[in-house]
């Protein structure tokens, strides 16, 4: 974990306003997690390809202006928290709210995205973050679907918002991924995990 260097010694945690004003002056990517800047690991090539494949497949149902990669989203946490999903598909209202924004972040007063996708990097810490913490944070934000794509576990978990909670479905191998948002989505878990369309 790395905390912002420009904090005063009496200030232990960043607020969302501090985070938005913080000038990182570095190529390192950070998420704000419970008031602290946490350095994010760089993505593997496979993780990046998975995001591209999903964007390509979902482009049959969603216009290009609704996709966001590395756009931040403020979520509920013990203290201020802002996540950077691997992929977001915005609702029309969320896309409208971001128009003209100086920074690509969905603030708490903005509508949530329709879909958030996280591609899990290897390691227990990454698994806990994507399966546990982000699950509760995205649920509290009211995001309709949250997909956890896990190359190590060789599965795609689709969490669908139903009556205030996420219902979970896990897809492996040649099982077609089923999405309430995109019922005509036709890729299998294996196609997504191997970043292949055929």
Image (cartoon, grey):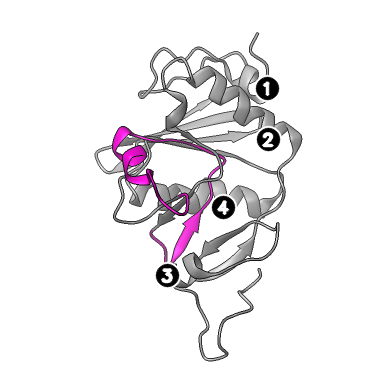
Label 1 near label 3: C-beta < 8 Å? no
Cα separation, mark 4 vs mark 2, equals 16 Å
Query: Please, what secondary structure does the residue beneath circle 1 have?
Result: loop
- Residue at image position (50%, 50%) is 132
Q: Is residue 6 left or right of residue 58?
A: right
Q: Which mark is residue 47?
A: 2
Q: Earlier along the polypeptide chain: callout 2 or callout 1?
A: 2
In the picture of the structure, the residue carrying the numbered disc 4 is 129
- Residue 135 vertical position relative to residue 155 in the rendered view, above or below: below
Label 2 near label 3: C-beta < 8 Å? no
- Where residue 6 sits, quadrant-wise, is bottom right
Query: Please, what secondary structure does the residue beneath circle 4 have?
Result: helix
Q: Earlier along the polypeptide chain: callout 3 or callout 2?
A: 3
Indicate whether residue 163 is drawn in magenta.
Answer: no
Q: Earlier along the polypeptide chain: callout 4 or callout 2?
A: 2
In the picture of the structure, the residue carrying the numbered disc 1 is 195
Closer to the eye: label 3 or 1: 3
Indicate whether residue 80 is drawn in magenta.
Answer: yes
Cα separation, mark 3 vs mark 2, equals 30 Å
The residue closer to the viewer here, 78 or 124, is 78
Q: Position of residue 52 (x, y in %)?
A: 62, 27
Magenta residues, as a range? 76-104
- Residue 49 vertical position relative to residue 9 in the rendered view, above or below: above
């Amino acid at each position: 974990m790395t905390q912002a260097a420009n904090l005063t010694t009496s200030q232990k945690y960043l607020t969302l306003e501090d985070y938005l004003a913080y000038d990182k002056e570095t190529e390192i990517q950070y998420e704000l997690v419970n008031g602290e800047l946490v350095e994010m690991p760089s993505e593997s090539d496979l993780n990046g390809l998975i995001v591209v494949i999903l964007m390509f497949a979902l482009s049959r149902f969603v216009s290009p202006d609704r996709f966001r990669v590395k756009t931040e989203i403020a979520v509920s946490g013990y203290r201020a928290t802002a996540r950077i999903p691997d992929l977001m598909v915005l609702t029309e209202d969320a896309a409208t709210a971001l128009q003209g924004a100086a920074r690509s972040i969905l603030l708490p007063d903005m509508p949530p995205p329709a879909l958030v996708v996280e591609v899990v990097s290897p390691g227990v810490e990454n698994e806990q973050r994507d399966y546990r913490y982000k699950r509760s944070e995205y649920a509290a934000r009211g995001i309709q679907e949250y997909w956890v794509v896990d190359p190590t576990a060789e599965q795609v978990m689709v969490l669908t918002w139903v009556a205030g909670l996420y219902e979970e479905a896990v897809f492996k191998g040649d099982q077609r991924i089923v999405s309430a948002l995109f019922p005509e989505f036709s890729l299998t878990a294996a196609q997504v995990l191997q970043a292949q369309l055929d």
